[in-house]
Amino acid sequence: MTQPLATPDYRYRAFISYSHRDASWAAWLHKALETYRVPSRLVGKQTAAGSTPRRLAPIFRDRDELASATDLGNKVREALAQSANLIVICSPSSAISRWVQEEVLAYKRLGRSERIFCLIVDGEPGASERPDAQQHECFAPALRSQIDALGTLTHAPAEPIAADARAGKDGRRNAKLKLIAGMLDLSFDSLKQRELQRRNRRLSMMTAMAMSVAAITASLAIVAMHARSAAEVARADAERRQRQAEDLVDFMLGDLNDKLHQAERLDIIQDVDNKAMTYFASMPTTDVTDQVLAQRVKMLEKIGSVQQEQGHLPEAIASFDTASTLASSLATKAPHDIERQVQWARMQAFVGMAHWDEGRLDAAQDAFEKARGILLKSEPYAPQNLQLTFELEMVDNDMGHVLEARGQLDLARGPYTSALALSHKLVAAQPERADWQSELGGAHNNLGKLALLRGDLADALTEYQADYAIESMLAAQHPQDISQRETVLTVQAILGRTLALAGADDAGIRRMQQSVDTAKELVKNNPDNGDFQQDLARYCGQLARLKRLNGDLDAAKALTAQSLAVVSNLVRQNPTDAAVQRLHGEILTEQSAESLASGHVDDTRAQAQLATDALQPLLAKQPHERSIVLMNMAAQLLLAATSSNTDEARRGWLDVVATAQDQPSGQGDPRLLSMEAQALLALGDTAKVHALTKQLWNSGYRDAEWLAILRRGHWAYPVNAEFQKRMLAQSQGSQISD
């Protein structure tokens, strides 16, 4: 008798690793694998992977499984150790995902490199080796390289086992079968032949079923409509027949759609959905039961969500609009029924998100405003309903983001303030919810940004400190959550920069140094993580500025050199990445300022010009993105200050003034005002400089660079005692200066 092969017992058949941008692919694969039934003639066959099972479940999809996890790192490692296989969904997004990189590395360190399988959904394998196509690479670095005995990536190339789901390659169906064959150590050809026989039988049955259901539905609809026009005594029978039709449509959109999805028959799915929409269009929306209308809303929501996922946005909006109209009629009948009001608001929010995906911000804002109005009108009837509160908080966030995207930063304050209050309410009701705590921190950060843009440094510091307190608490509760550590270092750096703007340079430098130290540690433990490398480069550069302005030029140059080494490598790897180009421009600007401080005029101009060259294309696309605007103004000031051509220098200063005055909102931003004042001072417009200086003094602005400019011009700029009192009170209450 043949002995079964000795294989370890695993909790999961496979672990799916993916980038959030590929979530739809992960959802499809997870469902495809868990619902797959191995052909009966292959069940029990002994292979190197063990006895072939009837089903592949359970499959671990980390973002779903860890929704309520308290320790992300430990849970992931535990799940990886308990997974017989690792499946990586490969695309340009996953190739730069730190989570995908870490999960692959962790699995390889378990000694299971041969049990890693790739599913290519976008991009190109090996593109990283071609300088003109590096951004299309679909394999994460950990997939492309082997590891040594210490678990460290080497330069020895690895050859990932991959199935290619792209059109023109394996396609979804064959790619899925290749993955399954690899997982079970079966021959792909034998599995495909068995699957083909079974699939042909199943498709024949389901195609006949779909056509039959469509025919029956149409017949029942006709019967229902005729019955409705008959005598009153036939009303009950008409309603019964109509409910039968609605139930069949529900089946078409539910179970049948799911089964057809598994069989890759998107053509039949679309036909079924179209017939359902035709049916809904033919049926009256009056003189029917509320139950029927509620059922239609849910079904139309299903249709719209599928259409949106497929990228058919006009069709999705039409479905959501129809669902919203029906939900509105239900909500109007029962104004105190909170579930109906929330459903109506949610349909409006779906409309808004679909418009957002289209890039139609006006339409998105209109839909979000309608959703918000519905929820606010219902709130007095259910003030303690947390679901309503959460829906309202999310809509307020959506509204704030739309206003930001439109450049209406001042108007975003209203919805952001409301989101903060609602987040407080949610956290007070369920303080154990880490996601609600994080929402609260984000709301504080949004308000801190708006406070800075209107020139209220004290309020900005208060809001940033509140966010930092929440994020650092969450990091302490979840010490293995690397993402949370990155959030903390980012908020820490924001707080440090803002402290320095208010003149608290020592506290600002300490905060910024802590961010740099954390970023170094993250890069050391995750050397291939691009996000961590950007953090390190950015905050080294910003710390360098503070060091330079406080007299430590040598330390500043060392930090900038380290930052440039990192960012130059990132530029080579991702030459078209806008975030990397912006960071490159920022670091070059600081290097230029250091050259000026050293008296090297030619170097100053060359470096400032390189910074401008990196920033100008970004500014053309996003003329009001504040970080790009500020960096470009700083580079222009350096070019003007070192120009030997008087007319050229004057044009540069005028451009800086025009840029500051052309901003549609956030014109109280002291960083913007100080650079405008610097340009006006060079132009000799002292009257305007006096006005701006007064505004900056009132805000408590004491950035070291601004103070140095005023000292050189012998301008009086005493300490704002009232602002210092506010700072002192806040530091005592929240330890801002620590």
Image: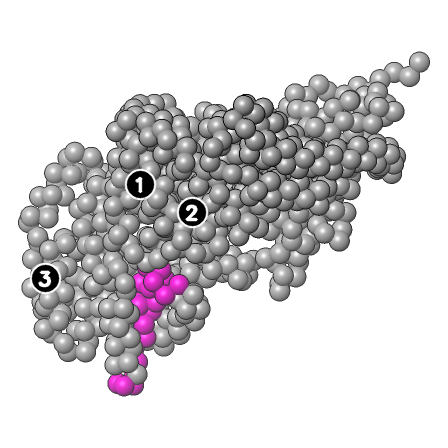
Q: Residue shown at 71%/45% (left/top)?
A: 267
> How far apart are the two marked residues, 2 and 3, measured between alpha carbons?
43 Å
Nearest the viewer among 279 and 470 is: 279
Of callouts 2 and 3, the N-terminal one:
2
> How far apart are the two marked residues, 2 and 1, measured between alpha carbons?
14 Å
**Crowd class of label 3 (few under 14; some 14 to 19; many from 20; radius 10 Å):** few
Residue with the mark numbered 1 = 373
The answer to whether residue 544 is left or right of residue 672 is right
**Crowd class of label 1 (few under 14; some 14 to 19; many from 20; radius 10 Å):** some
Q: Is residue 43 above or below residue 533?
A: above
Q: Is residue 128 magenta?
A: no
Farthest-out residue, right: 1
User: In the image, which is nearer the foreground, mark 2 or mark 1?
Assistant: 1
Q: Residue shown at 63%/44% (left/top)?
A: 274
User: Which percent across, then down, holds residue 161?
Assistant: 74, 42
**Mark 1 in CB contact with mark 3 (< 8 angstroms):** no
Element assignment for label 3: helix
Residue with the mark numbered 2 = 352
> Which residue type carries mark 1?
Gly
Nearest the viewer among 259 and 466 is: 259
Q: Residue shown at 44%/41% (left/top)?
A: 325
Residue 493 visible in the picture: no
Provide the residue span drawn in magenta.
622-647
Q: Is residue 211 above or below residue 55?
A: below
Q: Is residue 152 above or below residue 672?
A: above
Residue with the mark numbered 3 = 694
Of callouts 1 and 3, the N-terminal one:
1
Q: Quadrant of residue 660?
A: bottom left
